Image (spheres, grey):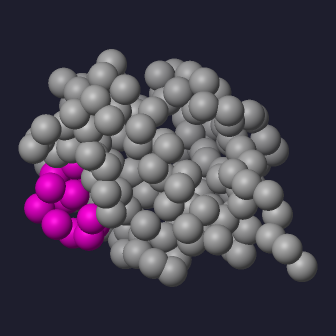
Amino acid sequence: MNGWTIAPEAYDSPDAVALRRDYYDEVASRYWKRPATCEEIDEGLTGDGVERLVPPTGQFLVGRRGAEPAACGGVLMLDGERAELTRVFVRPAFRGARGAALLLDALEAAALGLGARRMVLNTRLDLIEARRLYVRHGYAEIPAYCSGPYMDIWYGKELGPPKAA
């Protein structure tokens, strides 16, 4: 896997917490067009629902390049057929090394393992690199399935055949 390992990890492990903080720092700083403060990051992570990213309602994954924690992402089951892709992040020092593609593959496998047949996600228009990644991996724009202040565009992808009746 090109020096990458991607595996389930507790969302509250030290490495997972550090990755989640870096993720929130990047998306908040880009949105506000200024560096996010530690207090803003703490506030953003408080009550964000990450505790649902455990089986059977979801899964949180951490990617490492060598021994270094480099990436993270989660899947959240929305219903018996759909999972939502969330918190997908690769630290800047590790970008361009195929980690994002491997992470997406692992997240899709995790969703299938939880029973999902379709993956959906929402993102912002300014997160151009993320949008390109999703489209490269077969995600297509779909109608909004939820709403919120930081949601501009929605994507979906079929993961596998429908469950047998």
Q: Residue at x 26, y 38 (%)?
A: 4
Q: Residue at x 60, y 24 (%)?
A: 136
Magenta residues, start to end: 9-25
Q: Is residue 123 above or below residue 12?
A: above
Q: In this view, does 40 lie above or below 81?
A: above
Quadrant containing the N terminus in the rendered view: top left
Q: Quadrant of residue 139?
A: top right
Q: Residue at x 23, y 27 (%)?
A: 94
Lateral position of residue 147 relative to residue 144, left or right:
left
Lateral position of residue 81 relative to residue 37, left or right:
right
Lateral position of residue 148 relative to residue 51, left or right:
right
Q: Where is residue 34 in the image (x, y as percent from the top left)?
A: 27, 27
Q: Position of residue 77 (x, y in %)?
A: 59, 69
Q: Position of residue 131 (x, y in %)?
A: 56, 28
**Magenta stretch, main secondary structure class:** helix
Number of marks in picture: 0
Query: From this viewpoint, is residue 77 visible?
Result: yes
Q: In this view, does 42 lie above or below 30?
A: below
Instruction: Say if the magenta span includes residue 21.
Output: yes
Instruction: Say if the magenta span includes residue 147.
Output: no
117 or 87: nearer the viewer: 117
Q: Which residue is drawn at 16% across and 66% down?
A: 13
Quadrant containing the C terminus in the rendered view: bottom right
Q: Quadrant of residue 152?
A: top right
146 or 56: nearer the viewer: 56
Q: Where is residue 110 in the image (x, y as percent from the top left)?
A: 50, 61
